[in-house]
Image (cartoon, rainbow, N blue to C red):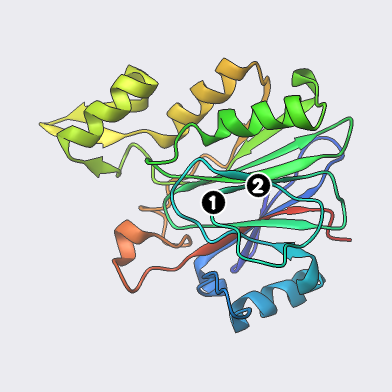
Amino acid sequence: MLQSREDILTFILPFDGPDILLSLKEAGNMEYRENGITPERLNLYGLIGVDPERAVSCRQIHSRKIFMVDKAPEGVLQGDGLITGNKNLILCATAADCMPVYFFDRNTGSFGITHSGWKGTGIAADAVHLLTQKMNSRIDDLVAVMGPSAGVCCYEVDKERYSFFKNNWGAESVDKRDGSFYLDLPAANRQILESTGVKNIYSFNECTICNDKYGSFRREGPGRFTLMLAMIGYFG
């Protein structure tokens, strides 16, 4: 179930687990800074009652690199995913058409987050692998929540990118209409998660390009787009 206000979207799961949140366009640009925290992020942390010292973020590089963290890092993490078993941490990722995917283990309490754009598609499977191999999660205990992203309705690409996606993630991950080529990030990520054996998969199921409550690189344009902040953790 989704709970929405003008600046924050919250995903309410049908069982106990970590808090799952996405800031909306109205909350402002949540860009990552290596030398400090933006006022927009500080304001968001204040709204939800989270100490900024608990929040962990990466400098995202559109990769499949995931970090296992047990405390706030002292240096810059360059990658696109985070996993922890420390309930005192809040894991964060930014997105503006790419898909944030949230993970948690209903038994151990471990959780994670990934940033999955077209270049990094497949990172969700890497997160599941790390959770099962490094955090001792059982596949039946894992839950994945796919955040909003560019949808197949709007995510037009060139033929080369279309072919790359189709060859790697199958025919269901793409669409061709009226001579134009489209990617289906939700379908690709669902297929990837299902291939790992994860059964508990939930989705925001909204396109960030055609829904203006979301920040969108495609809709707003370079230099003007709003990065949203995806967060998972035990806020209280």
Q: Which residue is mark 1?
A: 79
> Does residue 37 appear in this view?
yes
Picture quadrant of residue 56: bottom right
Q: Which residue corresponds to the image point at 72% horizontal and 62% vertical from the top-left?
A: 73
Q: Is 137 positioned to the left or the right of 57 in the image?
A: right
Q: Is 89 positioned to the left or the right of 147 in the image?
A: right
Q: Is 108 positioned to the left or the right of 39 in the image?
A: right
> Does residue 1 appear in this view?
no
Q: Position of residue 226 (x, y in %)?
A: 44, 68
Classify the position of the N terminus by image quarter. top right
Classify the position of the C terminus by image quarter. bottom right
Whether tag 2 and tag 1 are in contact, CB under 8 A, the answer is yes
The amino acid pointed to by label 2 is Phe
Q: Which residue corresponds to the image point at 30% horizontal and 43% vertical from the top-left?
A: 155
Could you tell me how far apart the alpha carbons at marks 2 and 1 are, in whole angstroms? 7 Å
Q: Residues within 10 Å of mark 2 (few under 14, many from 20)?
A: some
Q: Which residue corresponds to the image point at 47% horizontal and 60% vertical from the top-left?
A: 214
Residue closest to the far left: 179
Q: Position of residue 209 (x, y in %)?
A: 36, 53
Q: Is residue 22 above or below residue 39?
A: above
Picture quadrant of residue 24: bottom right
Q: Position of residue 132 (x, y in %)?
A: 74, 25
Q: Is 218 positioned to the left or the right of 73 in the image?
A: left
Disc number placed over residue 67 in the picture, else none? 2
Q: Which residue corresponds to the image point at 52% horizontal and 24% vertical from the top-left?
A: 192
State the SS at label 1: loop
Disc number placed over residue 226 in the picture, else none? none
